[in-house]
Amino acid sequence: MYTVFPTAFFFRHDITESQKMLYGLLSCMADSRGYAFPRNATLQKYLGGVSEDTVARRLKALEAAGAIRIEGGDGGRGIRKIFIAGVDFSNPRNSAEVGGINLRKNAEVHIICNNNINNKKNKKARAKAQATEEEISGWISRWAVNLCWEREATTALIADFFAFVESRKAKGKPFLTIRAVSMQANKLVRNVPEGVGPTEAVARMRYMLRSAITHNWEEVYPIDARTEPDFWNWAGQEYGISAAAAAAPDYF
């Protein structure tokens, strides 16, 4: 249930706020034929804090202002009909006329125009922010080199990262910005335990990347208790290291 209020009446200063409230209540009660038939006592109940005489005075004021038209006696079904003027109940949007200007249509056009302008700006901003494949590849290479590992280890890590990028592209979820790629790179670094040697560190990063490719994931996930055995099996084959060897203390 809604209150239908013609914009023209909203801007009229000869109708008080309390009278506008009564008008809104009547429009809420009106049926599809555009009239309501409440008693003054019913209106008093919903308005609250006013007398029936006050309700009667406000009704007369609204009728004098042309906001309503009253037919019949003092109220009640079949006795009095209060017609709501200024509202087309078949199309309430037509009630938005003020000085020959339909504010609703005006607002809708304004919103559509603004949305079109904003969409164009957003598309340009997104296009400008998007990185090319060469830029993404270059960033990954520089990131891996800055880890200061041996050339062979760095090359293998870069290759796996490139493969991860390609798997995302094949899935229809390509990396579009450097920030998106850097987030995955940061996850790789964060999920390597502190104190591990460079060989185990690069092995863990490569394993996370390869797991993401194998499972068609959109991002990398840390090695947990469930995948730890498989990691050590792969690391033993690829690098010849084992959990026991990695945990052995370095005395020299």
Image (tube, helix red, strand yellow):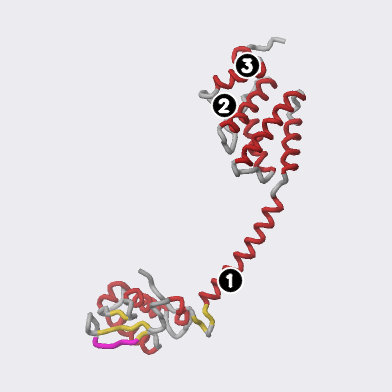
- The CA span between labels 2 and 3 is 16 Å
Closer to the camera in the image, 171 or 152: 171
**Around disc 2, counting alpha carbons within 10 Å, would you say few (fewer than 14), some (14 to 19), or many (20 or more)?**
some
Q: Residue at x 68, y 12 (%)?
A: 250
**Label 2 amino acid?**
Ile
User: Principal SS element in the magenta part?
Assistant: strand
**Around disc 1, counting alpha carbons within 10 Å, would you say few (fewer than 14), some (14 to 19), or many (20 or more)?**
few
**Label 3 amino acid?**
Gly
> Which of marks 3 and 1 precedes in the sequence?
1
State left or right for residue 184 relative to residue 133.
Answer: left
> Which of marks 3 and 2 precedes in the sequence?
2
**Label 1 amino acid?**
His
Badge number at residue 110 = 1
- The CA span between labels 2 and 1 is 53 Å
Q: Residue at x 64, y 39 (%)?
A: 183
201 in relation to 52, above or below? above
Badge number at residue 181 = none
State left or right for residue 240 relative to residue 93.
Answer: right
Viewport quadrant of the N terminus: bottom left
Q: Which residue is mark 3?
A: 236
Q: Which residue is mark 2?
A: 223
18 in relation to 180, above or below? below
Q: Closer to the observer: label 2 or label 3?
A: 3
Q: Quadrant of residue 154?
A: top right
Q: Position of residue 131 (x, y in %)?
A: 71, 46
Magenta residues, start to end = 69-73
Q: Closer to the observer: label 1 or label 3?
A: 3
